[in-house]
Amino acid sequence: MENGQHQQSFIQKYIFSTDHKVIGMQYAINGLLMAIAGGFLAYVFRYNLAFPGKDIPLFGQLSPMQYNTFITNHGMIMVFWVGMPLLLSSLGNFLIPTMVGTDDMAFPTLNMLSFWIFFVSSIVLLLAFFVPGGAYGGGWTMYPPLSANAYMNPNPDFFQALFSGASLMLLAVALEFVAMLMGGINFVVTTINKRAKGMTAFRIPLIVWFIDIASVIFMFAVGPLVAGAFMLLLDITVGTGFFDAARGGDPILWQHLFWFFGHPEVYVLLLPSLGVLGEILPVFSRKPLFAYKSIIYMALFSAVLSVVVWAHHQFVSGIDPRMATFFSIGTIIISIPFAGIFLAFMATLWGGSIKFTTPMLFALGFIGLFLVGGLTGLFLGSNAFDIYAHDSYFVVAHFHYTLFPDIFFGFFAAFYYWFPKFVGKDLDKTLGKIHFWLTTIFFNLTFFLLFFNGLAGEHRRINNYSFFGNVNKEPYTTFEKICTVGAILLILSQFVFVINLIKTLRSGKKAAKNPWNATTLEWVTDSPPKHGNFDTFPVVYRGPYEYSVPGCNEDYLPQNQEN
Amino acid sequence: MSNSSTTVDIRQTPQGRLGMWILIAGELIIFGGLIACYLLNRIRYPEWGMEAVHTSTFFGALNTAVLLLSSFTIVLAHTAANNMKPRKAQMYMMLTIIGGLLFLVNKSIEYSREISEGLTFSSPKLVASGKEVGSLFWSFYYIMTGLHALHVVVGMTVIFIIMLQIRKGNNLHRVELAGMYWHMVDLIWIFLFPLLYIAK
Amino acid sequence: MNIFPENVTTYAGEIDNLFWLIFTFVAIAFVISVIALIYPMIRYSNKNSPKAEYITGEKKKHFKWITIALVLLAMSDFVILVVEHGTWDKIEMNPPTDGVRVGITGIQWNWVFTYPGPDGKINTSDDIVINEMESELHVPVNTNVIMELRSRDVIHNVFLPNARLKQDVLPGRTNIRWVNFTKEGKYELICSQICGVLHSKMRNFIVVDSKEKYDAFMKDLYEKHNPKPKVDSPAKVATDSLQAKVPSADSTAKK
């Protein structure tokens, strides 16, 4: 292949492109657009929770059915159509080829196909809002028999059942899985086979390691759920009884299949963001990443453990109580390697020379907020307290404190860090910092008080709490209102980001080749890298985090620099 | 400096083969999940033996033989491709596709026999006669063999496309990839056959 | 500071104490971590520390701090596990077997209450079945109440905030949970597993009566319903046929 020497039409270059950078961009744009959809849903149901029964600006009345639909799709969209594309696919596509020093993915056509299948899956998911009966509204976990009977007509005709909200959601998820599997094959094969000369295993940047580990976990965990999704789809459409107790099936089987995937999925989302931290913290501390090898070993250890902790989501679902003890122990053990990774990140700061740039702020904010999310996990991991806290707002606050920093702080940190490289323009620093502070403050305003509501016995997925005595009193009703105000302000503060983006794209300064004085290979090439990435393929001489090496003129030693 | 092969430094496994191995691992996990669900239920419901009687061991064994033979022909195609004999490789690939077709014909005869006995995906007849648990066996039977048959079709399509691609002697290494996929399809059947046909 | 709903059962206090125990560990860990995060930000900021040190962290000397922290974490995890295991054991694994039996069955979207007939057993032909919106289940105070939890359609979840109890109810299974109220009053019984459109309105009550009031209530109930073994009770047929078809996988159900 001649590297971009021949002229390409617009469609070849930007739509059906096989260039990994364009595909990464497409994933990022698709993910951000879905984030707008997910955010809008959140705004509508949050408003409804604070002011039940009132007309919602920009929407109108929210019926109980719509409320259920909105919370379900908010969860689904934010995890599978925002988190996965932004963190795994977009970062993986941008970074793996440039960081291991090659021209493109191992299978560029497969890569393109992966994005377009993902795009179709987003359309299918949103399409469900417009079919008769509306999108599925039984929780994003889709527990049967509720999901299996979602089509209320007692004798649904096959096509009616196929175009019901529940089936479309299953189809969309299945397509998304196929897209991510294709992407995962590409990531792993590219890393194994297309590394630059001298790029040995322990010279690969942390984020590449982590995206690959995440891809492998995903591939391993998703298989049984793909089978399960087929089974559930057949339950809905042709009336089989895989999950129907009256027919000998078992509804808990779905829960096992779902969480066997669902819990590793948390780590699939977490590892790429941790990789982002692993790149950003050393650069802005001007110091090597603390215990790089141990971090990788700890990540591998937790990857193995991640597939044996799933049933901690099912402590109260009627599984054998003895099993719960086993999973409680597993859950608590898996907290140790992750705590180790975070401690190593914090240790990276000690003895450094810290520059508080926008990406660094997001990275530090991530650590601070995730601390709350991680520590509150200890409450839920202990099965006895989970008897009370399960499915309460305590859980809601807990997983928002883990997933929001993970998905958005992780992505924004990466965005502000690599934007100059891959778009070639410098973002506005002041607006970036304003964006960080507003996001952090309003995020806490939105979710912190929900811990108290949860402890007071407020359970999830209810459209009107005035019905329940324990929580329909002060201060919990005020807390609900504060949360809603926080959520609206949190959404509004993202406009700072949009303004920054528009301003930069229109009149941003051209970015330098290596604006942050970083060492990894993507900073060697032009900003933005052209088709094929490198003029001459780099040769690697050292590990990725050689900052402030004693006896060196500069305070950084790029990986490709000979001595 | 234009070809990707210049970056390649650790080159033990060709790219395509590595990708195919990962794909096969993913597929095996999907079927593994399905087979695990089946086994759990099978242990729970001994009465499934009564239902398994209705599967035809003769057709199952015939299909096993057909698939094994077609695996053999794809190996021959691979050898021919290695020896740079595209026409010979094409012939063996054609034989493999015919093997796949035979499998599907057999399978559809089997399906139509079972369907005419009222044993379908949801087997309303069994449910009506109070054998709900038995109907679950047939649900598993159809989803497992159906998903496998789908893979047979995909494998045949892949072999057909590659057969056309190697016409001029190019891309001969892809024969191996098609062969790997076909072996996986075969392997899955080797698991399904005893589970659904022999265990009664 | 009372951040929990009023505690009215024998084991609710245990769960609250467990919370405060974990909270203590978490608070200490949080404070230490925040200091360990904020202090270097000030001490080693660009201004205060213009030149960074070269520490790879691969040496034992440096890594020992992380090891110490992880060992401390593992130890506190272990303490939590041991303490919570006792509570788990009490609530879930070894429920008492003697006490007043009641049946709670989830349907879309109401809780159906079942009182045993004169035989004292649930799911027999002389049951008294109450299926009304906003209905109340009467139980005696200071007595073990053994609840047989079932579902007729989809998954529901029995949630008693004041007892700190949650338990999913699944079609085709019987889960046995227990509760012992220490205070009279009227408490909410909520469904906390999404179960369809009117999930938000699925709420009934448990009324805890003194022993005398409870006896009077039961006498009244028997007089009103005059329970006799009969074969064609529709509620009974519905739950029974479901039970017969599906061998329950729950070990507790077979007791």
Image: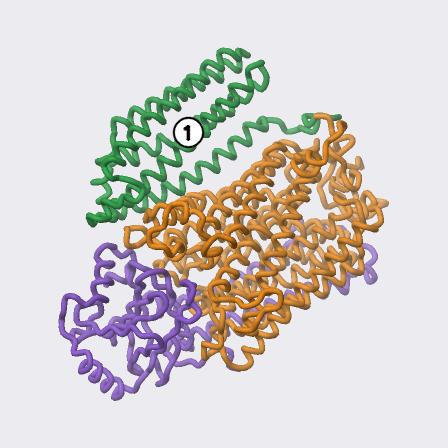
Chain colours: A orange, B green, C purple
Residue furthest bottom as drawn = C212
Relative vertical location of residue A59 with respect to residue C17 in this rendering, above or below: above
In the image, taking residue A501 as reference, residue A20 lies left or right, namely left
**How far across and down, in percent of the image, does residue A130 sit?**
51, 53
The residue that mark 1 highlights is B152
Q: Residue at x 74, y 34 (%)?
A: A531
Query: At numbered mark 1, what does the secondary structure look like: helix, strand or loop?
Result: helix
Toward the viewer: A19 or A466? A466
**How far across and down, in percent of the image, does residue B30 sit?**
43, 40
Quarter of the picture holding the N terminus of chain A? top right
Quarter occupied by residue C129: bottom left
In the image, taking residue B173 as reference, residue A223 lies left or right, namely left
Quarter occupied by residue A489: bottom right
Type of amino acid at the residue the image marks with label 1: Val
**Image label count:** 1
Toward the viewer: B105 or A284? B105
User: Could one spot residue C187 in this view of the protein?
Assistant: yes
Q: Residues within 10 Å of mark 1 (few under 14, many from 20)?
A: many
In the image, taking residue B181 as reference, residue A484 lies left or right, namely right
